Image (spheres, rainbow, N blue to C red):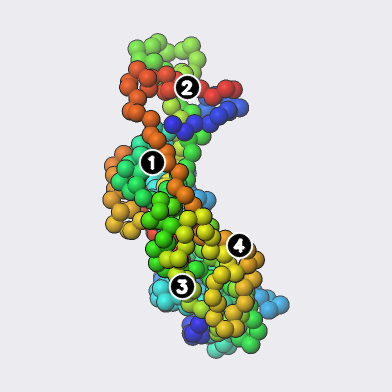
Amino acid sequence: MKVVPMKAERRSALGRNQVAQLRKEGWLPAVVYGEGREPVSISISEWELEQHVKQHHKVFHLDIGGTVESAFLQEISWQATTDRPLHADFKRIDLTKAIEADLEVTAVGYPMGLSKGGVLSKDHMVIRISCLPTAIPESLEHDISGLDLDQTLTAGDLVLPEGVTLVTPAHTSICHVAPAKVVVEAPAATEDAAAPAADAKPAS
Amino acid sequence: MLMPKRTKWRKQMRGRIRGEATRGNEVAFGEFGLQALEPGWVPARVIEAGRIAISRNAPEAKSWIRIFPHKSVSKKPAETRQGTGKGDVEFWCAVVKPGTIIYEVDGVTEDVAKRAFNRVAHKFPVKVRLVRRRHG
């Protein structure tokens, strides 16, 4: 994963109203913590962060008022209905030391079990890996076209790039093809039949 | 239709719906979700109608219902004089806040999910929108 530079400023606006004002001006409140040092409140450009998120960038050289720190984008809080970021968490890292990170598995192909009446069930599509910050893969694709009925793809089956080790237990199921359960819908109820259902009460 | 198996009290006060959903506001199981944009009550029969609409318009999809009708709504019969206590329970509904994910689907293309959720949206008493799962 590429290490990208990002400008940040120390933030004195800490309260709810001050932070809301900051957001109106296009800035995003964020925090940098970790490595045994004091957490620092910063503000970054909301637009810039969204561009990095689109390109799946996670490792940054944060330029906080002249001092450059390496940081890993740990978490972003999103506003649920507008999809705007609310806050970002950066964790200080040493680029020469391995860190743990989440990696999403992308399933490619049409499992053969689906054509036999199966249903693909995605169990844990995110795995935990350990590697150098610069070696974190941007994505991990795995071909599941060979997955038959009642077969499971486990974390141990995934082919990881060199230098990346799996932290998630190897027996963890990533996805499996299960036989489809056929649900027979009851015939449409008539009004008379539906009436008692409306009055139905749970036992108190 | 969905309804609680047992409750401590049969009848409830109406309450107010304030703020936005802080839980159940992310697509957690499938690839696409239907998100409420307004606060409101969704009756159990509407949840069921929506489920049927999804299963008819996207039969190959795996679907999840993310809300449950915990709230009982009582009503007095028509042309009844005031008094004599609170009415009987008429229906059960789920209280949704803006941001709540109502349904999720997986195993279908965006077009199919959009078509199925569009049918559902027409039945709903609140404004909704389609949202995708947030990756990474």
Residue holding disc 3:
A141
User: Within 10 Å of the Cα at label 1, are there few (<14), some (14-19), or many (20+) other Cα atoms?
Assistant: some
Residue holding disc 4:
A172
User: Within 10 Å of the Cα at label 3, are there few (<14), some (14-19), or many (20+) other Cα atoms?
Assistant: few
Mark positioned earlier in the residue sequence (3 or 2): 3
> Quadrant of the image for the C terminus of chain A?
top right
- Subunit of label 1: B
Question: Same subunit under labels 4 and 3?
Answer: yes
- Subunit of label 2: A
Q: CA distance from mark 4 to mark 1?
A: 31 Å
Q: Amino acid at mark 2?
A: Ala
Q: Amino acid at mark 3?
A: Glu
The label nearer to you, 3 versus 1, is 3
User: Which label sits on residue A200?
Assistant: 2
**Label 4: which secondary element:** loop
Q: Amino acid at mark 4?
A: Thr
Q: CA distance from mark 3 to mark 2?
A: 50 Å
Question: Same subunit under labels 4 and 2?
Answer: yes
Residue holding disc 1:
B51
Instruction: Confirm whether residue A52 shows in the render.
Output: yes
Mark positioned earlier in the residue sequence (4 or 2): 4
